[in-house]
Amino acid sequence: MDRKSKNRWFNIYFTLTIMIALVFGCNISAAVAGEHLGQEIPEHASVVKLASVVENPADYDGKTIVLTGTVSSICGSRCHFNFQDGVHTVAVYPRGFKLPKMKRGDAVTVYTEVIAGEGQTVYTALGLQL
């Protein structure tokens, strides 16, 4: 192989390597500690234990509250995640933002609206802090 052919193959290899790095590098959106999504969590808002909401959902119907806990799992399409605080786990659906890639055990603070229905309570994340 002559020098000109070697340089051409090197250029092709180098270009492909850079393109692959850019594609995969730009698509990695791991959750960054301290990242805020959606609405800012109000400073004056008190944190509520999930157990309190699960045991008395009607007391929180239509209210916005702050929950702190961990991610127990996340939907593959990131349409919702399962939030855990102690022994309780609930599904939380984002409103107005897309969930980032998160993993089990990530600590989260959620500014959420609670809608208590008959037999089911819906948790809508208005804001999220990782």
Image: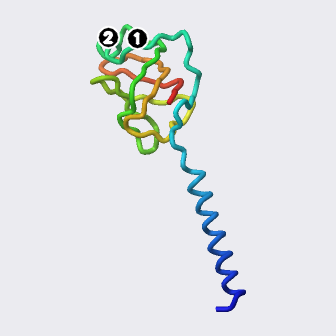
- Give the x, y percent position of residue 40: 59, 21
Residue 56 badge: 2
Q: Is residue 105 above or below residue 14?
A: above
- Quadrant where the N terminus sits is bottom right
Residue farthest toward the right in the current orientation of the protein: 4
Q: How many marks?
A: 2
In screen coordinates, is 119 left or right of 116?
left
The amino acid type found where label 2 is placed reads: Asn
Circle 2 sits in a helix, a strand or a loop, which is it? Answer: loop
Residue assigned mark 1: 60
- Give the x, y percent position of residue 39: 58, 23
Count neighbours of disc 2 (C-alpha within 10 A) and say few if under 14, some if 14 to 19, many if 20 or more.
Answer: few
Cβ–Cβ below 8 Å for labels 2 and 1?
Answer: yes
Residue at image x 47%, y 20%? Answer: 112
In screen coordinates, is 103 left or right of 34?
left
Residue at image x 42%, y 17%? Answer: 115
Residue 85, quarter of the rendered image = top left
In screen coordinates, is 104 left or right of 34?
left
Name the residue nearer the viewer: 108 or 76. Answer: 108
- Give the x, y percent position of residue 66: 46, 17
**Cα distance between the residues tagged 2 and 1:** 7 Å
Circle 1 sits in a helix, a strand or a loop, which is it? Answer: helix
The amino acid type found where label 1 is placed reads: Tyr
Name the residue nearer the viewer: 85 or 121. Answer: 85
Residue 86 badge: none
In screen coordinates, is 94 left or right of 87?
right
Name the residue nearer the viewer: 2 or 108. Answer: 2
